[in-house]
Image (spheres, helix red, strand yellow):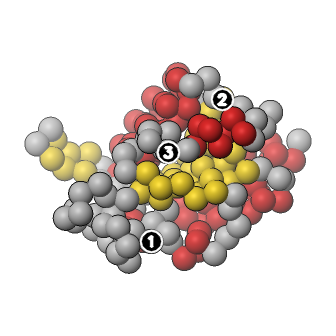
């Protein structure tokens, strides 16, 4: 098994911007733990950065403070930084060619938001034939309300994890993933 850890969209937008992640508590600390464990175990790390395609977007505006990678992540070792403009980390990026160059067969998902870019990327990886690991406490989201209704952050997160575990991913906690690396 040759893994790559994806650290998806851990950007200031989710901390000091318009989309503050609220659930689960400690997700950033767990992302840091998995980055450290990946580095210690020779696992490739891809940091993914979202950029709004529209120049007048209220979120992820290119070169804004909110667009920047969170400082706790920006200062850590990584093998590649990939910029994307859509929820899927494979769409319009070099991610898949990087996977092929590095003979990656397993992708580990961490980052934000659970139901958007993490879920989309996990499904894309599954569709491309990769084994997918989805870290339940190293991903996160916030509550949403729109014309279709409303959902709490906890409900939304849990629903995505249940769906991922049903078909697409091995859903696990950070500690479980790190323990598996040592065995």
Please say if the residues under marks 2 and 1 sit with CB atoms less than 8 Å apart: no
Q: Residue 131 — which label?
A: 2
In which quarter of the view is residue 96 placed?
A: top right
Mark pair 2, 1: CA separation: 29 Å
The residue under label 3 is 93
Residue 46 showing in the rendered view: yes
Residue 151: percent from left, percent from top = 26, 45
Viewer-proximal residue, 89 or 151? 89
- Classify mark 2: helix, strand or loop: strand
Q: Where 58 falls versus 85 (above or below)?
A: below
Comparing labels 2 and 1, the label whose residue is closer to the camera = 1
Residue furthest out toward the right: 183
Determine whether, in the image, residue 79 is placed left or right of residue 183. Answer: left
Residue 175: percent from left, percent from top = 71, 52
Residue 7: percent from left, percent from top = 57, 55
Residue 158 showing in the rendered view: no
Mark pair 2, 3: CA separation: 20 Å
Comparing labels 2 and 3, the label whose residue is closer to the camera = 3
Viewer-proximal residue, 162 or 41? 41
Q: Residue at x 33, y 64 (%)?
A: 60
Q: Residue 166 — which label?
A: none
């Amino acid at each position: 098994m040759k893994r790559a850890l994806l650290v998806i969209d851990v950007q200031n937008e989710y901390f000091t911007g318009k989309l503050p992640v609220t659930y689960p508590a400690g997700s950033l600390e767990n992302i840091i733990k998995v980055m450290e464990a990946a580095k210690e175990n020779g696992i490739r790390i891809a940091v993914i950065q979202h950029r709004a395609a529209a120049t007048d977007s209220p979120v992820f505006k290119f070169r804004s403070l909110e667009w920047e990678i969170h400082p706790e992540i920006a200062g850590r070792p990584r093998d590649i930084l990939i910029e994307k403009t859509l929820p899927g980390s494979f769409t319009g990026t070099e991610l898949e060619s990087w996977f092929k160059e590095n003979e990656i067969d397993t992708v580990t998902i961490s980052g934000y938001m659970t139901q958007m870019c993490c879920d989309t990327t996990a499904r894309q990886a599954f569709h491309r034939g990769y084994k997918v690991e989805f870290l339940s406490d190293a991903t996160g989201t916030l509550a949403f309300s729109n014309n279709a209704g409303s959902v709490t952050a906890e409900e939304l997160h849990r629903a995505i994890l249940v769906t991922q575990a049903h078909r697409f991913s091995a859903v696990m906690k950070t500690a479980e993933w790190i323990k598996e690396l040592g065995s």
